[in-house]
Amino acid sequence: MTIGIPRALYYYIYYPMWEKFFKELNIKIALSPKTNKKILDLGINYSIDEICISIKLFHGHVKYLIDQGVDYVFIPRVLYEENHKSNCPKLLALPDLIKDSFDIQDSKILSPKIYLNYGSKKSREEMKKIGEIFVKDEKKINKAIRESIRFQRLYESYLYKNYGDTLELYEKLSNLKILTKNEEDYDLKIGIVGFPYDIYESYLNGSLLEKLKKMGVKYIVSNMLYYDKINNSYDFLSKDLFWHQSNVCLKSGLYFLKNKKIDGVITLSCFGCGLSSIYTKLLDIFNEERTKKPLMHIVIDEHTGETGIITRLEAFIDLLRIKKGEGYV
Amino acid sequence: MSKRLIIFPRMGNSYIAFKTYIKNIGDIPVVPRPLNKEILELGVKYAPEGICFPFKVLLGQYLDTFEKLKIGKDKKVYILCLGGYGPCRFGYYNALHEKILKELGYKNFEIVTVEWINGPLIKGLPKFIKMVFKLIGFNAPWNIIRGFINAAYKLIAIDDVEKKAYKIMPRELNRGDTEKAFSEALKIIDEAPYNNLKKIKEAHIKALNVLKEVEIDEVKEVLKVGIIGEVYMLLDYDNNREIEKKLSYMGVETDRSLTTTTWADDRIIHVKRHKKHMMEIVKPYLGEFIGGDGQESIMNTILYKEKGYDGVVHILPFGCLPELVAKEILVKVSKDIDMPVLTFTLDEQTGEAGLITRLEAFVDLIEKRKEILIRKN
């Protein structure tokens, strides 16, 4: 019995919890490989042309898993992650999209609903239903849920304490506790704003983070900030955005722009993403009105070439260095 | 209190009714011009690139009206528009419009967002009450109630006339007669006095009589096509490039799944009943409410099949989130229930000729399909 987990979308947010949950229940997980050309092509073939690249990639990963012959595909339906908020319509209908594009049976898709956050009562009940499919022992399921939530919290605490970004932490997920903070020297510190599934999808964005590391730039990604701390409107917003993930992006963007220790901000979004179109504009207006910080928007899609991104990135970093008075000119 | 200038988004012919309401509460309505290239260019220029088409249209309308009438800078103006709390982006339009208009130097305006309370009541209620006061102004309650009733009657009359017009348009003997009669009928409703319900009702009957005078071929067999999609694209002729008229001239009877009155009934008056009914129908395909008109599109496709329609035309603005989901799911629905669906994604770059060619091909196909089906039985 194997459960396939696509390495896309919410994988970059909730994976530690899912891994722990299934491990506790002694169920084998099949994780789809890192995105490659084949998966991208599968995704493009099996979805409609106008939808955003993140959803297309998700289709590709699911198709890959189905071709590998997994017994179930795990596609949670995240309804809302914050009180009185909602989620992107495409994510709300994610299991339905997959079901309708691949003609697979309903029962092969495991789609627990996640309400509010992974630890809420309703979400626990949904996870319990998933556990009951495989294991009869209720105590064991409860323990698995408890452990998985604890593990997710642990992972997030390391993330918020800046022990590394999501990809770095995922590599060392089995022994988080021995992690040490690497206090390297850096001359620049920039903030990166975007959904985790765009920023950490290194195949699409031309390994943006690695490039930055090579250039000796320290970065903070928006999901490495503790949300409750940055969640205020900076007397700028008359209304919060309705989607938690884009709210995180907007608020962290505002935080980066206001923070004097951050030298520049890069936003990364994918073409056709409705939520990004709003928060990038708001950041632009805020920056124009108040902070006047270097701010760059990168939009990716399936045709994005790596060189284009590198050129823009290098130019941006050079400009920042010149601005700081240690440039090459 | 002096009279306020109130702008509202122009959407199809519903402006006639909104005008009536604003006149009833003693203010001056400002109606944006019908969509043209100039307005669209303004909207596209200042709106974020990736945002949906209706946002650009609305922004263009506001900017155009501000410029033409020289308001918004010295003269205060109010903008009246619906709001919401997602998951569709429409709910955030007003907040973003406000920011963009202010950035462009228009400081003297206020957007009145008509929306229900979201979140804790203690926080939301004062905001809601404030909004209501702005919506109704300082008026006697009977004025407001009269305004609502008169506007509602005009709305019903407009929708009724529209529905009848598109029913007879494919059957008319002299091409163009219905269109002329239709615009005359609308004029009659528009000219009916805003504060006299009796006269409005009379105008309704008079307008219907005008349509009855059009000579039609009553026995003509016509194809029936339902039109589904995003509400603003459906209701505004300039947004959907008069798709109903085009289909009518190809000899197809059209039915629009949404009208202003059914929209108001489903989304404001009987929300719960409508939602329950809808989610029951779409359950095999969609497990969750996705906002906008996405689930309505899926539901109406299924309902049109039950009603015996020959095909469905799906219209969505580029980048619309819920409709995109609907588009992907409709592929499966169409296969399952054996119903031809033609999808149009429209935005500022859509050409007219491509649209007509695709429509003609679609009509040819469903015509042949119907013939084959009849022969089989």
Image (cartoon, rainbow, N blue to C red):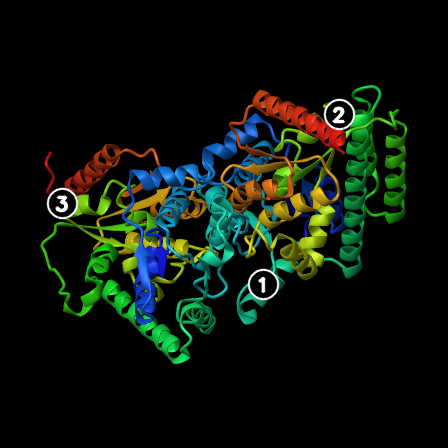
Is residue B255 left or right of A24 when viewed as pictured? Answer: right
Q: Which residue lies under the disc numbered 2?
A: B251
Q: Check disc 2 and give the amino acid type.
A: Gly
Given this view, does label 2 or label 3 mark the residue nearer the observer?
Answer: 2
Q: Badge 1 local density, few (<14 within 10 Å), some, or many (20+)? A: some
Residue closest to the eye, B161 or A79: A79
Task: Find numbered disc 2 in the image and state the secondary structure of the residue it sits on.
Answer: loop
**Residue A255 sits in quarter:** bottom left
Residue B276 bears which disc, if any?
A: none
Marks 2,3: beta carbons within 8 A:
no
Task: Find numbered disc 3 in the image and state the secondary structure of the residue it sits on.
Answer: helix
Marks 2,1: beta carbons within 8 A:
no
Image coordinates for residue B53, horizontal then vertical, percent:
53, 37
Residue closest to the eye, B137 or A276: A276
B138 lies above or below B97:
below
B34 lies above or below B262:
above
Q: Check disc 1 and give the amino acid type.
A: Ile
Looking at the rendered structure, whether the residues under marks 2 and 3 are on a common chain is answered as no
Q: Which residue lies under the disc numbered 3?
A: A214
Total of numbered circles in the picture?
3
Output the chain of dot 3. A
Q: How far apart are marks 2 and 3 (CA)?
A: 65 Å
Q: Check disc 3 and give the amino acid type.
A: Lys
Marks 3,1: beta carbons within 8 A:
no
Q: Which of marks 2 and 1 is nearer the N terminus?
A: 1
**Residue A17 sits in quarter:** bottom left
Image coordinates for residue A307, horizontal then vertical, percent:
23, 33
Residue B117 bears which disc, if any?
A: 1
Task: Find numbered disc 1 in the image and state the secondary structure of the residue it sits on.
Answer: loop
